[in-house]
Amino acid sequence: MHKFSIREALKWGWNEAIDHIGFFAVVILVSWTLNIALQMTGKALTERAPFLGFLIYLAQLAIGIMVQLGLVAASLKIFNKEKPREEVFRWNPKWFRSSLGASLLLWVAVALVVSALFVMFIAVLAFVFKTGTVAQAWAPDIALRYVVTLAPLFLLGLLIVIIPILLAFVVFQFFPFFIVERNMGPLEALKASKEITRGSRGRILLLNLIYIGITFLGALAFLVGLFLTIPTLVLANTYVYKKLTDASTAAPPAAPVK
Protein backbone atom coordinates (compact mmCIF):
# COMPACT_ATOMS: atom_id res chain seq x y z
CA MET A 1 0.00 0.00 0.00
CA HIS A 2 1.39 3.39 -0.98
CA LYS A 3 1.79 5.74 1.95
CA PHE A 4 2.47 9.45 2.31
CA SER A 5 2.06 11.98 5.06
CA ILE A 6 -0.54 14.70 4.44
CA ARG A 7 1.09 16.83 7.10
CA GLU A 8 4.54 16.48 5.57
CA ALA A 9 3.21 17.17 2.06
CA LEU A 10 1.58 20.43 3.15
CA LYS A 11 4.56 21.42 5.31
CA TRP A 12 7.03 20.85 2.48
CA GLY A 13 4.78 22.64 0.00
CA TRP A 14 4.39 25.64 2.31
CA ASN A 15 8.11 25.95 3.04
CA GLU A 16 9.10 25.69 -0.62
CA ALA A 17 6.36 28.14 -1.65
CA ILE A 18 7.78 30.72 0.77
CA ASP A 19 11.32 30.08 -0.49
CA HIS A 20 10.21 30.59 -4.11
CA ILE A 21 7.50 33.21 -3.52
CA GLY A 22 9.01 35.67 -6.02
CA PHE A 23 9.05 33.12 -8.82
CA PHE A 24 5.47 31.98 -8.22
CA ALA A 25 4.18 35.54 -7.75
CA VAL A 26 5.47 36.50 -11.21
CA VAL A 27 3.95 33.37 -12.75
CA ILE A 28 0.57 33.96 -11.14
CA LEU A 29 0.47 37.66 -12.05
CA VAL A 30 1.45 37.01 -15.67
CA SER A 31 -1.02 34.14 -16.09
CA TRP A 32 -3.86 36.09 -14.47
CA THR A 33 -3.15 39.19 -16.57
CA LEU A 34 -2.99 37.14 -19.76
CA ASN A 35 -6.15 35.24 -18.87
CA ILE A 36 -8.12 38.44 -18.14
CA ALA A 37 -6.89 40.06 -21.36
CA LEU A 38 -7.92 37.03 -23.41
CA GLN A 39 -11.31 36.86 -21.69
CA MET A 40 -12.04 40.52 -22.39
CA THR A 41 -10.85 40.21 -25.99
CA GLY A 42 -12.84 37.04 -26.55
CA LYS A 43 -15.99 38.56 -25.10
CA ALA A 44 -15.67 41.63 -27.30
CA LEU A 45 -15.00 39.56 -30.42
CA THR A 46 -17.78 37.05 -29.77
CA GLU A 47 -20.45 39.67 -30.37
CA ARG A 48 -18.91 40.89 -33.65
CA ALA A 49 -16.95 37.89 -34.94
CA PRO A 50 -17.99 34.66 -33.19
CA PHE A 51 -15.34 32.58 -34.97
CA LEU A 52 -12.52 34.85 -33.77
CA GLY A 53 -13.99 34.75 -30.29
CA PHE A 54 -13.91 30.96 -30.43
CA LEU A 55 -10.25 31.04 -31.52
CA ILE A 56 -9.45 33.28 -28.55
CA TYR A 57 -11.15 30.76 -26.29
CA LEU A 58 -9.02 27.95 -27.76
CA ALA A 59 -5.88 30.05 -27.25
CA GLN A 60 -6.89 30.65 -23.64
CA LEU A 61 -7.41 26.90 -23.15
CA ALA A 62 -4.02 26.08 -24.71
CA ILE A 63 -2.21 28.63 -22.55
CA GLY A 64 -3.94 27.34 -19.44
CA ILE A 65 -2.83 23.77 -20.19
CA MET A 66 0.77 24.80 -20.84
CA VAL A 67 0.95 26.95 -17.68
CA GLN A 68 -0.34 23.98 -15.67
CA LEU A 69 2.28 21.69 -17.20
CA GLY A 70 4.93 24.36 -16.72
CA LEU A 71 4.08 24.62 -13.02
CA VAL A 72 4.43 20.85 -12.76
CA ALA A 73 7.86 21.02 -14.44
CA ALA A 74 8.96 23.87 -12.16
CA SER A 75 7.73 22.02 -9.05
CA LEU A 76 9.62 18.89 -10.07
CA LYS A 77 12.78 20.95 -10.42
CA ILE A 78 12.22 22.44 -6.98
CA PHE A 79 11.76 18.94 -5.55
CA ASN A 80 15.05 17.93 -7.16
CA LYS A 81 16.66 21.01 -5.54
CA GLU A 82 17.12 22.73 -8.89
CA LYS A 83 16.23 26.30 -9.77
CA PRO A 84 13.00 26.72 -11.79
CA ARG A 85 13.33 29.10 -14.71
CA GLU A 86 11.47 29.28 -17.99
CA GLU A 87 9.55 25.99 -17.58
CA VAL A 88 6.22 27.63 -16.83
CA PHE A 89 5.97 29.51 -20.13
CA ARG A 90 7.80 27.01 -22.30
CA TRP A 91 5.80 25.67 -25.25
CA ASN A 92 6.16 21.91 -25.58
CA PRO A 93 3.91 20.49 -28.33
CA LYS A 94 4.22 16.89 -27.11
CA TRP A 95 3.27 17.82 -23.56
CA PHE A 96 0.33 19.79 -24.88
CA ARG A 97 -0.92 17.00 -27.15
CA SER A 98 -0.55 14.37 -24.44
CA SER A 99 -2.27 16.49 -21.79
CA LEU A 100 -5.12 17.44 -24.10
CA GLY A 101 -5.53 13.83 -25.20
CA ALA A 102 -5.53 12.53 -21.62
CA SER A 103 -8.06 15.17 -20.56
CA LEU A 104 -10.38 14.32 -23.46
CA LEU A 105 -10.13 10.57 -22.78
CA LEU A 106 -10.83 11.15 -19.10
CA TRP A 107 -13.83 13.42 -19.57
CA VAL A 108 -15.36 11.23 -22.30
CA ALA A 109 -15.10 8.22 -19.99
CA VAL A 110 -16.64 10.18 -17.10
CA ALA A 111 -19.43 11.47 -19.36
CA LEU A 112 -20.27 7.92 -20.48
CA VAL A 113 -20.40 6.68 -16.88
CA VAL A 114 -22.51 9.63 -15.73
CA SER A 115 -24.86 9.19 -18.71
CA ALA A 116 -25.37 5.50 -17.95
CA LEU A 117 -26.07 6.21 -14.28
CA PHE A 118 -28.38 9.08 -15.21
CA VAL A 119 -30.42 6.81 -17.50
CA MET A 120 -30.85 4.42 -14.58
CA PHE A 121 -31.86 7.35 -12.39
CA ILE A 122 -34.49 8.45 -14.91
CA ALA A 123 -35.82 4.88 -15.00
CA VAL A 124 -36.22 4.97 -11.22
CA LEU A 125 -38.06 8.30 -11.42
CA ALA A 126 -40.34 6.90 -14.11
CA PHE A 127 -41.16 4.00 -11.83
CA VAL A 128 -41.95 6.39 -8.96
CA PHE A 129 -44.30 8.45 -11.14
CA LYS A 130 -45.96 5.35 -12.56
CA THR A 131 -48.47 5.30 -9.70
CA GLY A 132 -49.77 8.77 -10.52
CA THR A 133 -49.50 11.72 -12.88
CA VAL A 134 -47.34 14.78 -12.26
CA ALA A 135 -50.46 16.81 -11.58
CA GLN A 136 -51.57 14.32 -8.94
CA ALA A 137 -48.18 14.57 -7.34
CA TRP A 138 -48.94 18.15 -6.35
CA ALA A 139 -52.38 17.36 -4.93
CA PRO A 140 -52.49 18.42 -1.26
CA ASP A 141 -53.32 14.98 0.07
CA ILE A 142 -50.30 13.26 -1.49
CA ALA A 143 -47.83 16.13 -1.96
CA LEU A 144 -45.94 15.31 1.24
CA ARG A 145 -45.51 11.71 0.17
CA TYR A 146 -43.97 12.76 -3.14
CA VAL A 147 -41.67 15.29 -1.48
CA VAL A 148 -40.43 12.65 0.94
CA THR A 149 -39.96 10.18 -1.93
CA LEU A 150 -38.37 12.50 -4.47
CA ALA A 151 -36.00 14.43 -2.20
CA PRO A 152 -33.67 11.44 -1.67
CA LEU A 153 -33.92 10.64 -5.39
CA PHE A 154 -32.85 14.14 -6.41
CA LEU A 155 -29.98 13.90 -3.91
CA LEU A 156 -29.05 10.58 -5.50
CA GLY A 157 -29.12 12.24 -8.93
CA LEU A 158 -26.71 14.91 -7.69
CA LEU A 159 -24.38 12.26 -6.28
CA ILE A 160 -24.52 10.38 -9.58
CA VAL A 161 -22.93 13.44 -11.22
CA ILE A 162 -20.48 14.35 -8.45
CA ILE A 163 -19.08 10.95 -7.42
CA PRO A 164 -17.72 9.79 -10.83
CA ILE A 165 -16.07 13.18 -11.39
CA LEU A 166 -14.54 13.14 -7.91
CA LEU A 167 -13.29 9.56 -8.26
CA ALA A 168 -11.82 10.27 -11.69
CA PHE A 169 -9.98 13.31 -10.35
CA VAL A 170 -8.52 11.38 -7.41
CA VAL A 171 -7.41 8.40 -9.51
CA PHE A 172 -6.02 10.28 -12.50
CA GLN A 173 -4.88 13.61 -11.08
CA PHE A 174 -1.17 12.80 -11.44
CA PHE A 175 -1.18 12.19 -15.19
CA PRO A 176 0.40 15.63 -15.93
CA PHE A 177 3.43 14.63 -13.84
CA PHE A 178 4.01 11.51 -15.93
CA ILE A 179 3.65 13.54 -19.13
CA VAL A 180 6.22 16.09 -17.96
CA GLU A 181 8.71 13.93 -16.08
CA ARG A 182 8.55 10.73 -18.12
CA ASN A 183 7.37 12.03 -21.47
CA MET A 184 4.44 9.59 -21.52
CA GLY A 185 1.55 9.63 -23.95
CA PRO A 186 -2.04 10.27 -22.81
CA LEU A 187 -3.20 6.69 -22.22
CA GLU A 188 0.08 5.64 -20.67
CA ALA A 189 0.03 8.62 -18.28
CA LEU A 190 -3.54 7.87 -17.20
CA LYS A 191 -2.66 4.22 -16.52
CA ALA A 192 0.43 5.23 -14.54
CA SER A 193 -1.59 7.65 -12.38
CA LYS A 194 -4.18 4.95 -11.76
CA GLU A 195 -1.45 2.55 -10.67
CA ILE A 196 0.36 4.81 -8.19
CA THR A 197 -2.88 5.98 -6.51
CA ARG A 198 -3.96 2.41 -5.81
CA GLY A 199 -4.21 1.92 -2.06
CA SER A 200 -3.89 5.63 -1.27
CA ARG A 201 -7.05 7.08 -2.82
CA GLY A 202 -8.78 7.76 0.47
CA ARG A 203 -5.85 9.86 1.67
CA ILE A 204 -5.63 11.60 -1.70
CA LEU A 205 -9.34 12.46 -1.49
CA LEU A 206 -8.86 13.84 2.02
CA LEU A 207 -5.87 15.88 0.84
CA ASN A 208 -7.91 17.34 -2.02
CA LEU A 209 -10.67 18.34 0.40
CA ILE A 210 -8.00 20.11 2.46
CA TYR A 211 -6.82 21.80 -0.76
CA ILE A 212 -10.33 23.17 -1.29
CA GLY A 213 -10.39 24.61 2.23
CA ILE A 214 -6.94 26.18 1.85
CA THR A 215 -7.88 27.71 -1.52
CA PHE A 216 -11.07 29.14 -0.01
CA LEU A 217 -9.11 30.73 2.82
CA GLY A 218 -6.63 32.16 0.34
CA ALA A 219 -9.43 33.68 -1.71
CA LEU A 220 -10.96 35.24 1.41
CA ALA A 221 -7.76 37.22 1.98
CA PHE A 222 -8.64 39.55 -0.93
CA LEU A 223 -7.04 36.99 -3.32
CA VAL A 224 -3.61 37.94 -1.93
CA GLY A 225 -3.51 34.66 -0.04
CA LEU A 226 -3.65 32.79 -3.35
CA PHE A 227 -0.07 33.87 -4.04
CA LEU A 228 0.92 31.46 -1.28
CA THR A 229 -1.87 28.88 -1.38
CA ILE A 230 -1.61 28.11 -5.12
CA PRO A 231 2.13 27.29 -5.08
CA THR A 232 1.71 25.45 -1.77
CA LEU A 233 -0.88 23.13 -3.29
CA VAL A 234 1.08 22.58 -6.51
CA LEU A 235 4.22 21.75 -4.54
CA ALA A 236 2.36 19.54 -2.06
CA ASN A 237 0.90 17.59 -4.98
CA THR A 238 4.43 17.20 -6.37
CA TYR A 239 5.59 15.85 -3.00
CA VAL A 240 2.76 13.29 -2.98
CA TYR A 241 3.50 12.27 -6.57
CA LYS A 242 7.17 11.67 -5.80
CA LYS A 243 6.36 9.68 -2.66
CA LEU A 244 3.84 7.52 -4.52
CA THR A 245 6.16 6.88 -7.44
CA ASP A 246 9.03 6.05 -5.07
CA ALA A 247 6.77 3.53 -3.31
CA SER A 248 5.49 2.00 -6.54
CA THR A 249 7.47 -0.93 -7.88
CA ALA A 250 5.45 -0.87 -11.10
CA ALA A 251 6.55 2.62 -12.12
CA PRO A 252 9.66 2.87 -14.38
CA PRO A 253 12.71 4.88 -13.22
CA ALA A 254 12.23 8.62 -13.49
CA ALA A 255 14.05 10.56 -16.18
CA PRO A 256 15.45 13.99 -15.28
CA VAL A 257 13.36 17.03 -16.20
CA LYS A 258 14.94 18.87 -19.11
Image (tube, rainbow, N blue to C red):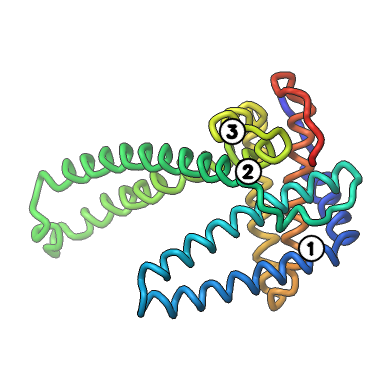
Q: CA distance from mark 3 to mark 1?
A: 28 Å
Answer above or below: position of 149 versus 250. Answer: below
| First in sequence: mark 3 vs mark 1 | 1
* Residue indicated by mark 2: 95
Which of the two residues, 251 or 114, is positioned nearer the viewer here? Answer: 251
| First in sequence: mark 2 vs mark 3 | 2
Secondary structure found at label 3: loop
Q: Residues within 10 Å of mark 3 (few under 14, many from 20)?
A: some
Residue 256 sits in quarter: top right
Q: CA distance from mark 2 to mark 3?
A: 8 Å
Check disc 3 and give the amino acid type: Gly
* Residue indicated by mark 3: 185
> Is 149 situated left or right of 207 in this image?
left
Residue 139 sits in quarter: bottom left
Secondary structure found at label 2: helix
Q: Residue furthest top?
A: 249
Q: Residues within 10 Å of mark 2 (few under 14, many from 20)?
A: many
Q: Which mark is on residue 24?
A: 1
Evaluate if marks 2 and 1 touch, with contact meaning CB atoms under 8 Å apart.
Answer: no
| First in sequence: mark 2 vs mark 1 | 1
Q: Quadrant of the N terminus?
A: top right
> Is 243 situated left or right of 131 in this image?
right
Check disc 1 and give the amino acid type: Phe
> Is 99 situated left or right of 155 in this image?
right
Check disc 2 and give the amino acid type: Trp
